[in-house]
Image (tube, grey):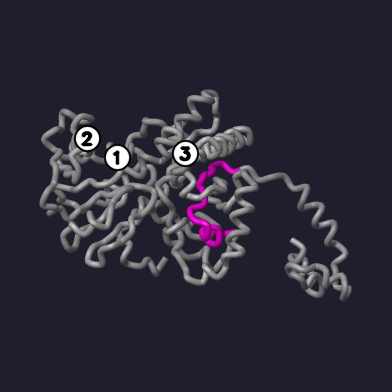
Amino acid sequence: MFHSLHHTQFKTNYSLFMPFYDYIYDTLDKASDQLHDSASKREEEIPDVVHLTHLTTPESIYHLRLGFAYLACKPCTSKWYLCLMWPMTAWSMILTLAYGRTFIVEGNHFDKLKLQSWAIPKYSQQYFIRSQKMPINKMIEEAILDADKKGIKVLSLGLLNQGEDLNSYGGFYVSKHPNLKVKVIDGSSLATAIVLNSIPNGTTQVLLRGKLTKVAYTIAFTLCQQGVQVATMHKDDYVKLKNSFSSFGKNFIIEKSYTQKTWLVGEGLTEEEQLKAPKGTLFITYSQFPPIKYRKDCSYHFTPAMLVPSSIQNVHSCENWLPRKVMSAWRIAGIVHCLEGWSEHECNYTMHNIDKVWRSTLQHGFQPLSVPINKELAHY
C-alpha cells in the first residue's frame, strides 16, 4: 500500500519494504498516512464461497500465494534447496502452531462470485494423531461458524478436513449446528463423477484398491449398475462391497492375476501392489492425495480435478500438486453448489445426483482433464 503511491506520484515512496529510507531522504509522500488510514477503514470483503484446506508439509507454506511466487506458480514438489531454509521452516512451524486460527490463502473472482481459500494451520501428519483430532475439529467448526456469521453461502471442505474418522465427512458440524445457513460441502459427488468419466470407454473390468470411502463405494455401485466388473485385491474389501451391494454380488471378484489395465486407487496403495499391475496400466486416483508413482511404464491421472474457466480471475498459484488453472473436485464442488443455488448440504453420507452435478459443472465452463500426470500440461 505504501509503495503504490510511487506508481502515481513517481518521485515519492521508492521503498517497498523499508519506508525508513524514504524518511531519511525526504521522499516520503505526504498522502501516505491518509492512504493508510483509508485502507485500514475499508470494509472486509465477504466472499460467497470459501474452500477450507490445510497445510500438507512444513515446506508447503512456501508454495502458498503468501509464500514465494516462484514456487506458488508451480505444482508442490520437494525441492532440495528448501532443506537449506530449515531455520525459516522451523520458525514458520512455530508461528502456525502458536497462531491456531484459519488464515486466508488467496481470493478469486468468478463472474459475480467472490471466492476465497482458507487454511487450517495444521499439517497432514497431524490429522493422524489421535490427540490432534479435537483441536483440529474445533478449528474447522470455528471456521464454519465464522463463515455462517459473515453470511458466506457455501463452505467446501478440502483434503483431510472432511475425513470420515475425523468428522463423518463434515456431518458432525451440521448435526451439531442444525440451523447453519452456510452450506457445508464435501464434494463427493463431483469427485465420483470425475473418476467415472476418466475411465476409458469400453472398459468391462476395473481393479479397485485403496481405502473404501464414500466416493469409493459410490464408484463401485455406479460401475456395477453399468455392468462393469469390480475386482479387489483383498478379501475384506470384497466382503464389504458385496455386503453393501448384495444385488450386484456377481459383479465383484477377488483378483489374483491382475490383468486389469484400469486401476481405481486411493489411500493405502503400496509399491508392491503397483508392481503387480501390467505394463500400460492407467491409475485413476479417487482420493484427495496422489499415490507415489513407482511405475514409469504406466500412466497416472491427477487426483479428481478439472480445468477452470478463463473467466476465473487471480489464479496465480497452484493448488497443491495440481497445475495452474486446475482446481480440485472438492473446491469446484463448492463453487458449482453456489452457482446453482442448491439449498442442501452435501456431507455425512449423503450425496447429490452425480449426473446432475457433472452436467452443471460442465455448463459453468469447467473442463475435464484428459491428460495423465506423466504428460505435462505445458500449454496451461
Query: In x, y percent, where is residue 110?
Result: 52, 50
Mark 3: secondary structure:
helix
Residue 321 lies in the magenta stretch:
no
Mark 2: secondary structure:
helix
**Residue density around tag 3, few if under 14, some if 14–19, many if 20 or more, within 10 Å:** few
Q: Quick check: marks 3 and 2 in contact, CB under 8 Å? A: no
For the record, the magenta segment spans 47-66
**Residue density around tag 2, few if under 14, some if 14–19, many if 20 or more, within 10 Å:** many
Q: Is residue 123 above or below residue 138?
A: below
Whether residue 30 is visible: yes
Locate residue 186: give its quadrant.
Answer: top left
User: What residue did someone put label 2 on?
Assistant: 241
Disc 2 marks which amino acid?
Answer: Leu
Which sits earlier in the primary sequence, circle 1 or circle 2? 1
Mark 1: secondary structure:
loop
Locate residue 300: give its quadrant.
Answer: bottom left
User: What residue did someone put label 1 on?
Assistant: 212
Instruction: Give the number of the mark in front: 3 or 1.
Output: 3
